[in-house]
Image (spheres, rainbow, N blue to C red):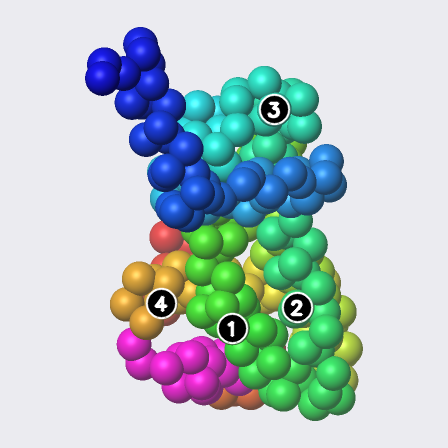
């Protein structure tokens, strides 16, 4: 007997429905959950590709949502990027501030170096976002602005040390920028090589900084520059 049009297909679908596994239902997210998901995905894409090469299309595709959903939450790529960078800036500053608990200046240097290296090790994507160049860096904050904030904290530490040792405390800002810059650039290098371990890297950084500081000349000069030359 001939099957009615579509009868075999309907029967097959009923059998498959009865005996097969049901397709997994998509879990609906609240607006807050969706926003957090998009921030996390944006963080990964910005870390991988940088600001210019990242597209809203890719962020939406990874989140399995339409582009308008991303625009609804952030207004565009610039808005998403600004949120990601702001979070990373605050996370790194909070980590470093929380680490500075010792009273001795050398221990403070060790703690600051370890805090930065620990952030690089544990939050690699976030660090990559911060150190990548972007046209929005000045508006959204960046790694340089974070390091400037850290340098201001170090400046207060050095200022007290300089006063106690007879050095000009006005130079504390210069030295703090030099010290923090040394740690920051080393951190960018270590981001890629990851050798030696962070404790060893921190120990060598502090060795250079502290032993150099402990033998500072009160009035340094350049031996290559002759008076009147």
CA–CA distance between discs 2 and 4?
18 Å
> Taking the image as drawn, is residue 204 in sight?
no
CA–CA distance between discs 3 and 4?
37 Å
CA–CA distance between discs 2 and 1?
9 Å
Report helix, strand or loop for mark 3: helix
- Kindly identify the residue that appears in the image at 32 percent across and 72 percent down: 194
- Asked if 137 appears above or below 161 in the picture, the reply is above
Task: Please provide percent x and percent y for residue 128.
Answer: 44, 51
| Mark closest to the chain's N terminus, 3 or 4 | 3
Report helix, strand or loop for mark 2: helix
Residue with the mark numbered 4? 190
Report helix, strand or loop for mark 4: helix
Image-based side of 196 in relation to 157, left or right: left
Residue with the mark numbered 2? 95
- Kindly identify the residue that appears in the image at 62 percent across and 60 percent down: 92
Comparing 199 with 219, the one in front is 199
Residue 201 in magenta? yes
Magenta segment's dominant SS is: helix
Residue with the mark numbered 1? 118
| Mark closest to the chain's N terminus, 4 or 1 | 1
| Mark closest to the chain's N terminus, 3 or 1 | 3
| Mark closest to the chain's N terminus, 2 or 4 | 2
Q: Which residues are magenta?
A: 195-210
> Taking the image as drawn, is residue 157 in sight?
yes
Q: Contact (CB < 8 A) between labels 2 and 1?
A: yes
CA–CA distance between discs 3 and 1?
34 Å
- Kindly identify the residue that appears in the image at 69 percent across and 54 percent down: 90
CA–CA distance between discs 4 and 1?
11 Å
Residue with the mark numbered 3? 69
Task: Please provide percent x and percent y for residue 33.
Answer: 68, 44
Task: Please provide percent x and percent y for residue 112.
Answer: 60, 74
Comparing 215 with 218, the one in front is 215
């Amino acid at each position: 007997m001939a099957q009615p049009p579509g009868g075999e297909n309907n029967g097959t679908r009923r059998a498959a429905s009865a005996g097969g596994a049901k397709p997994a239902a998509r879990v609906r997210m609240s607006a807050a959950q969706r926003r957090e998901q998009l921030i996390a995905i944006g963080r990964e894409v910005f870390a991988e590709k940088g600001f210019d090469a990242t597209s809203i299309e890719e962020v939406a595709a990874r989140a399995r949502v339409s582009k308008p959903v991303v625009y609804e939450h952030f207004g565009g790529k610039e808005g998403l990027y600004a949120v990601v960078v702001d979070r990373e800036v605050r996370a790194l500053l909070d980590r470093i501030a929380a680490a500075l608990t010792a009273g001795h200046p050398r221990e403070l240097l060790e703690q600051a170096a370890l805090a930065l290296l620990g952030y690089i090790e544990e939050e690699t994507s976030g660090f990559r976002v911060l150190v990548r160049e972007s046209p929005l860096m000045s508006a959204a904050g960046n790694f340089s602005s974070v390091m400037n904030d850290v340098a201001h904290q170090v400046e207060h530490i050095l200022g007290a040390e300089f006063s106690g040792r007879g050095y000009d405390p006005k130079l504390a800002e210069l030295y703090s920028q030099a010290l923090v810059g040394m740690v920051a650039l080393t951190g960018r290098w270590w981001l890629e090589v990851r050798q030696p371990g962070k404790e060893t890297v921190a120990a060598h950084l502090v060795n250079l900084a502290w032993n150099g500081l402990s033998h500072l000349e009160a009035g340094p000069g350049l031996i290559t520059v002759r008076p009147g030359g």
